Image (cartoon, grey):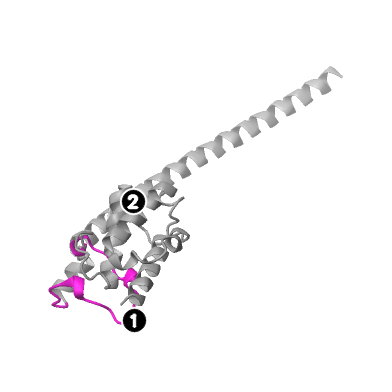
């Protein structure tokens, strides 16, 4: 009986050694696979960085420069695409309109820039990062007090809004909807 027990013990030990060897091989293979993956990822990352660098050095810097150089348009602020709402036109800091330039601000692009400049001034966000589809409160962090400040400044900068109820703008939730409503009011007041 003692001999049978020792055979079982030896068989069990061999089984454990086999399992241990299989586990060691598995971990070795896994380690080699991970090393190969990271080497390949590093190589791809380097190639991508090189390609991006190449694209950045050969691509035009901005749509405004393309319009000036290839299309021969000297004043990009007056260049308009037909049947495209003004708030969808490309933006560039080169064609900003100052809120002080509020003379006849019925032009949609001027209205857009005035609103964006005021929102930028009151929130601290640069004009070029203001997304017209962001929610006024959750996306831009504009609370009710800041909203009143902004809308007051917009009314001050666009005289045609002074006779209009400011609550209609206060109920809207995106910059894009503000701009569209202000353009509608400006068109109506012409």
Q: Quadrant of residue 68?
A: bottom left
Element class at badge 2: helix
Residue designated by label 1:
83
Between disc 1 and disc 2, whose residue precedes? 2
- The reply to whether residue 48 is in sight is no
Q: Quadrant of the C terminus?
A: bottom left
In the rendered structure, find residue 67 and report the number of the disc placed on it: none
Residue at 33%, 48% (x, y): give it: 123
Magenta residue check for 12: no
Kindly report the secondary structure that dominates the magenta region of the rendered protein. Answer: loop
Residue at 17%, 78% (x, y): give it: 71
Q: Quadrant of residue 52?
A: bottom left
Instruction: Tell me where residue 99 appears, x and y as whole percent.
Output: 23, 59
On screen, residue 26 versus residue 50, left or right, reads right
The answer to whether 78 is drawn above or below residue 130 in the figure is below
Decide which of 156, 6 is in the foreground and name it: 156
Decide which of 124, 186 is in the foreground and name it: 186
Residue at 30%, 47% (x, y): give it: 124
In the rendered structure, find residue 45 and report the number of the disc placed on it: 2
Q: Residue furthest top?
A: 2
Instruction: Tell me where residue 10 appears, x and y as whole percent.
Output: 73, 25
Decide which of 50, 64 is in the foreground and name it: 64
């Amino acid at each position: 009986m003692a001999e049978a027990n020792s055979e079982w013990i030896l068989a069990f030990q061999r089984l454990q050694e086999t399992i241990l060897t299989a586990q060691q091989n598995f971990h070795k293979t896994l380690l080699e696979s991970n090393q190969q993956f990271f080497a390949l990822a590093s190589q791809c990352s380097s190639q991508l960085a090189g390609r991006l660098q190449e694209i950045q050095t050969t691509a035009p810097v901005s749509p405004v420069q393309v319009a000036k150089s290839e299309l021969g348009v000297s004043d990009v602020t007056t260049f308009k695409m037909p049947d495209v709402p003004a708030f969808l036109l490309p933006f560039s800091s080169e064609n900003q309109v100052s809120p002080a330039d509020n003379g006849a601000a019925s032009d949609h692009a001027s209205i857009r820039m005035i609103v964006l400049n005021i929102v930028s001034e009151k929130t601290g966000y640069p004009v070029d990062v203001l997304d017209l589809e962001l929610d006024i409160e959750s996306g831009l962090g504009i609370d009710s007090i800041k909203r009143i400040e902004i809308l007051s400044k917009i009314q001050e900068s666009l005289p045609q809004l002074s006779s209009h109820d400011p609550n209609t703008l206060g109920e809207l939730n995106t910059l894009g909807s503000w701009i569209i409503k202000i353009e509608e009011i400006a068109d109506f007041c012409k």
